[in-house]
Image (tube, coloured by chain):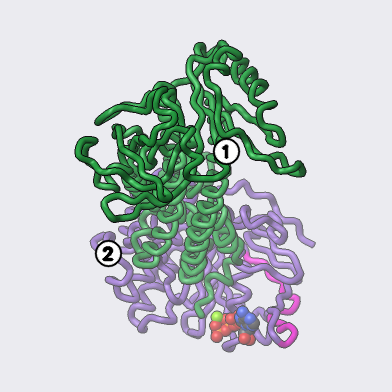
Amino acid sequence: MELAVPNTGNNHTTALPGDNLLQLEGISHTYPTTVGSRSTLHNVSLSVMRGQSCAIVGASGSGKSTLLNIIGLLDQPTSGRLLLDGQDMTRATAHIRAQTRNQRIGFVFQSFNLLPRLSALENVALPLLYRGYGHTEAQRLALQEVTRVGLVNRAHHRPAELSGGQRQRIAIARALVGHPDLILADEPTGNLDSNTAGEVLALLQALNREQGVTLVIVTHDESLAQTLQRCLLVKDGHLLERYPNPVHA
Amino acid sequence: MPDAQPHRYGPSLRQTLSDPLSSLRLLGRRALLALLGIAAGCAAVVALLNIGHNAAHEAIRTFKGLGSEVMVGSFTATPGTVTRPAPATLDTQHVKQAVPGLREIAPAILYSATVRAAGQAYPLSVIGTSHELEGVLGLRLRHGRFLSPYDQQSTYAVLGAQAARALNVGSVSNQGPVAIEGYLFEIIGILADHGHNPLIPIPVDEAILLPIEGMRRITPTPEITSIIARGRQSERLAEDAETLRDYLAPKAPGHTVQVQIPQQLLDGLERQARTFSYLLLGLASISLLVGGVGIMNVMVMNVSERRQEIGIRMAIGARPRDIASLFLLEAMALAVVGALAGALLGVAAAWMFVRLSGWSFSLSMTSLPLGIASSLLSTLFFGLHPARSAANLQPVTALRDD
Ligand SMILES: Nc1ncnc2c1ncn2[C@@H]1O[C@H](COP(=O)(O)OP(=O)(O)OP(=O)(O)O)[C@@H](O)[C@H]1O
Ligand SMILES: [Mg+2]
């Protein structure tokens, strides 16, 4: 077993060789159902280096979302070990997991998952408020992020008053506002037309290139997958490395 | 790296408090229902505490008006002994010699009978007593005179204020006789309103008063029901009461003689009031229970409706305790509004009850904090479970949209 180098959490250092941000060891997962249990992941192992961009593809129902939820500490594996930046998160308490999600991980969901009652700006500021920032400071930093995704003139709109593409950009701003090490996106362009999808994708890739944010994207879109450094295939709960993309590797 | 990195994880107090308030506005009609439940609970507690408080207040007030030197004697047949009647008369001069601490003493025989006047019949209390009652109770006359020592064998009667109104007797002059059990009595005086006093066992206002010796006309075996006396010194009252009891006991064989002084009577009242308070407490807890269940119901629905929101908040860093406090504080905000409204309502209800009872209202200072605190505690108790079930959701379960 390769020992991870303890990292002090400085977010945007350039990747060192062997600097594993994410390490999965023999992860399995089963859903309890009404008729016994249903196995979705079998003995999945994976290492993702800091700064890498990585696509996860596979047929519908193959277990991609389940895998991403486990990586994002939203779900727990039935067995196996998960290390984030060298720290074992497998048995961490709900408290520590929440704190780790807030400080290290940004989520982008297919259905945006913005809070409908809050304005775009308030949605973006929310992770900082949970982190303990004061209201004013959180709003100031959130506004920077909203500006970055090009929606400063929509900052005070409710999600319902925004288009799908705009909502996803706000969701990306929310994922970025806490300066995470890792962005996890589950079919982020699934609800968008191809033009808007292109814009959102370009935004994510720019982040990866310019700020060294590690990117893991679940997608059905072959052409999208090909623009990332790595492509992983989930098939019937098994994980196969399809290619490290020679163009980027 | 964001500047001014906070040193403690978790939302600020301001954030923790303002989040629930803003989502409260969205609860709408259902919030109103829970609010009503809590308000009713709090109103019940406040109203009941205030009514109890005012009842006690009233008792103490009448006790003070009575004067602290009064004592009340009574005879009760001792069970298991041969039944013999209690004495029918009392030699008050002799008692005063035997018990020098007494200023005045009057016996009373209480009976109820139908009194006929001007061809109409009224049920009234009949009190057989002596002229000393006037001094013992401090009775005042509106018309005529009270019974005198020379009236012992006469058929004179004095009307209580309320009884005079019932019989439509306005003055003593040109008033025909009244009939009690076939005997005619002449009205020689009408009393001014005396007021009800829970410590005195005879209803002077609603009665017709006769010389005690004449009671034999109305009932074949008259028995003294109470003896009312006034002592000279309130400090020596307990000893005087004991002397009086020792004097009376041999005169009423087969009976237990009790002589109570106001302090004992008041203690008895207080015991009664305490029983009453337990009853009120029971009622109030039921109301609080109902209010709490209402809150719980709203919260359970609230949690299940906002599962997606819980998931989103968890994904971006809300810890179980943050989720729990979000919902719990929402319930508490509801409860505070409900409790305040309920407290006002309760005071108003108590005020109305007290005024309708003819007492003067005084606000119980402890009732407001007690009512509000018990509503909040009930909410906390019933809100804890839904809040915890929300907090213990797995993020992935909460996020699933189905
Ligand atoms: N809550 C659940 N209970 C039971 N089984 C589940 C549950 N969620 C998902 N599954 C099953 O687990 C398997 C993997 O689901 P998952 O959502 O990870 O698939 P996916 O690869 O993301 O599919 P898609 O591309 O359609 O999103 C599926 O066969 C699904 O039926
Ligand atoms: Mg999926």
* Neighbour tally class for label 1: few under 14, some 14-19, many 20 plus, Cα within 10 Å: many
Magenta stretch, main secondary structure class: strand
* Neighbour tally class for label 2: few under 14, some 14-19, many 20 plus, Cα within 10 Å: some
Q: Chain of mark 2?
A: A
Q: Chain of mark 1?
A: B
Chain coloured purple here: A
Rendered image: mark on residue B223: 1
Residue A78 placement: quadrant: bottom right
* Secondary element at tag 1: loop
Q: Are dots 1 and 2 on a single chain?
A: no
User: The disc labelled 2 sits on which kind of residue?
Assistant: His
Q: Is residue B216 above or below residue A24?
A: above
Q: Residue at x 68, y 70 (%)?
A: A46
* Secondary element at tag 2: loop
Question: What is the x, y in percent for residue B170?
Answer: 21, 40
Q: Is residue B188 left or right of residue B330?
A: left
Residue B198 seen in the figure: yes
Q: Which residue is mark 2?
A: A157
Q: Is residue B63 above or below residue B328?
A: above
Residue A249 placement: quadrant: bottom right
Q: Nearer the viewer, residue B299 or A65?
A: B299
Residue bounds of the magenta highlight: A35-48
Question: What is the x, y in percent for residue B78?
Answer: 71, 39
- Between the residue at mark 1 and the residue at mark 2, the CA separation in whole angstroms equals 91 Å
Chain B visual colour: green
